Amino acid sequence: LVASQNFAGTCAGRRVSVVRLLNDARVALRALLQSPRRDDFADAVLEIAANIRHGAQLDPDAACGSIVLSAGQPYPSRHGVNTAILCSLVLDAVKAPEAHALSCMAAALTMNIAMFELQEALYHRTTPLGEAEQAEVRQHPDQGLALLRELGVSDSIWLEAVAQHHEMADG
């Protein structure tokens, strides 16, 4: 892992650090979710997803290692990027259509957009959630779907994945 985390691959003749690429994605996602803007939101998320996909494909081992190495970073953006990394790797393993990859990864990056602020607090929480917090957690998939639509997201795969990301197989 040490050798691969420093220079995991090449892109346009340049060496690329997959860990750095993925850490940059975590920083970019945090900035984007803290102040989403409608005019370029979907494109910005898809660009982050494309960078994560590129890193995961360059060196899957380094991408997995970055999940462990990112433990000290803020939870909401770390969770989204780590989930997107795993989505990319699973999509490759099952040979899913490439056209769906970025949509699925964008959903992973934005699945908790409606509870971005609360998510960090909950990560550090040691006591049970109050009723209002439980309600916010239960409602965040639907609220996230509405917010993504307001931000101009129209990709049906992306939206459906966000809406259903807490759904149980039995409904």
Image: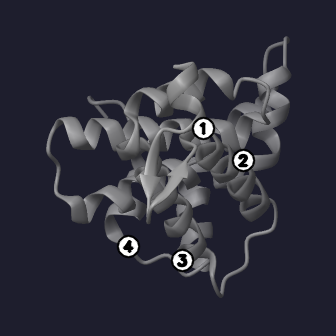
**Kind of residue at disc 1:** Val
- The span from disc 1 to disc 4 (Cα, nearest Å) is 29 Å
Residue 18 position (above or below residue 154): above
Q: What residue sits right under mark 2 in the picture?
A: 115
Residue 40 is situated, as x and y percent measured from the top left of the image, at: 63, 82
The tally of labels here is 4
**Kind of residue at disc 2:** Met
Q: Nearer the viewer, residue 15 or 109?
A: 15
Residue at 56% in and 61% down: 48
Tell me which numbered mark, 2 or 1, is placed earlier along the sequence. Answer: 1
Q: Residue 86 vs residue 79: left or right? A: left
Q: What residue sits right under mark 4 in the picture?
A: 155
Q: Which image quadrant: the C terminus?
A: top left
Q: Residue 63 vs residue 92: left or right? A: right
Secondary structure, mark 4, is: loop
Residue at 46% in and 40% down: 85
Q: Residue 122 vs residue 60: left or right? A: right
Tell me which numbered mark, 1 or 3, is placed earlier along the sequence. Answer: 1
Residue 124 is situated, as x and y percent measured from the top left of the image, at: 84, 21
Marks 1, 3: nearer the viewer: 1
Marks 4, 2: nearer the viewer: 4
Residue at 59% in and 45% down: 22
Residue at 60% in and 34% down: 6
**Kind of residue at disc 3:** Asp
**Kind of residue at disc 4:** Asp
Circle 3 Cα neighbour tier, 10 Å, few/some/many (<14 / 14–19 / ≥20): some
Residue 65 is situated, as x and y percent measured from the top left of the image, at: 53, 24
Marks 3, 2: nearer the viewer: 3
